[in-house]
Amino acid sequence: MKIICIGRNYAEHAKELNNAVPTEPVYFMKPDSALLTRNRPFFYPDFTKDLHYECEIVLRINKVGKCINEKFALTYIDAIGVGIDFTARDLQQKAKEKGLPWEKAKAFDFSAPVSSFIPVAEFEDMQQIAFSLKKNGDTVQDGNTKDMIFSYPAIIAYVSQFMTLKTGDYIFTGTPAGVGPVAIGDKLEAYIGEKKMLTVNIR
Ligand code: MG
């Protein structure tokens, strides 16, 4: 499986990192070795001094698709979860300055904690999902998918022009404003609506 991540998909977050609001989706990837499941702890890596959380809604792909029409794109998702796009912001900043790829900053081991998934049928309106992140009990990110610049269908149609989506792939759909650093000892808790979906203890 592969993990596709959309960058800069919430205008307020693009602004907080001094990035232009994009006119077409920006995406990058994380390998399967980035997955962290079942609320396992995350161990702060040695290679960064500025590890950030980015809480994001995650889509699970349920069939193979290439050049998917936006009209049918939602039929390629069977469940929704929440994840953290851990980012070594210091390494990413260096890469951005040099115009280099982001993988070192984004695709490292266990950089993608993912919750369990909720079937799409359980959502009244899939494109208006409230989600949030608490750090040590305080809400630090509070988003709603209705504020995404590129909708799920737009993302799926766009990405599938370039690469075939396969059953079991995940798409991280971008983070709202409020990203920030974590330290050893912190506890992150991600919610969909009122439901706690994911806990990540930083060790
Ligand atoms: Mg992100």
Image (cartoon, rainbow, N blue to C red):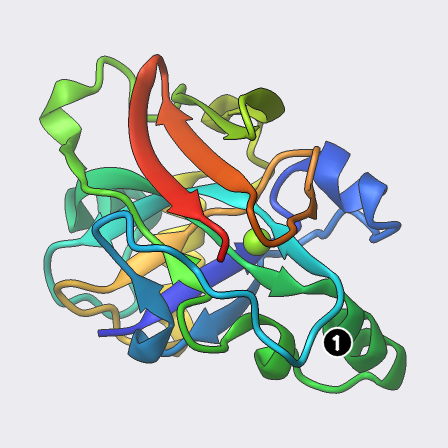
Q: Position of residue 196 (x, y in %)?
A: 31, 24
Q: Is residue 66 left or right of residue 148?
A: left
Compare residues 4 and 160 and report the one nearer the observer: 4
Quadrant location of residue 49? bottom right
Quadrant location of residue 195? top left
- Of the 4 image quadrants, the one containing the N terminus is bottom left
Is residue 12 positioned above or below 180 on the image?
A: above
Picture residue at 43% right of the left edge, 47% below the top: 201
Compare residues 46 and 100 and report the one nearer the observer: 46
Label 1 element class = helix
> To which residue does mark 1 refer?
91
Is residue 13 positioned above or below 143 on the image?
A: below
Q: Is residue 170 left or right of residue 131?
A: left
Picture residue at 25% right of the left edge, 38% below the top: 80
Q: Position of residue 187 (x, y in %)?
A: 49, 39
Q: Position of residue 86 (x, y in %)?
A: 54, 59
At label 1, the amino acid type is: Leu
Q: Categorize mark 1 by other alpha carbons within 10 Å: few (<14), some (14-19), many (20+).
A: some
Picture residue at 58% right of the left edge, 81% below the top: 103
Q: Position of residue 101 (x, y in %)?
A: 67, 84
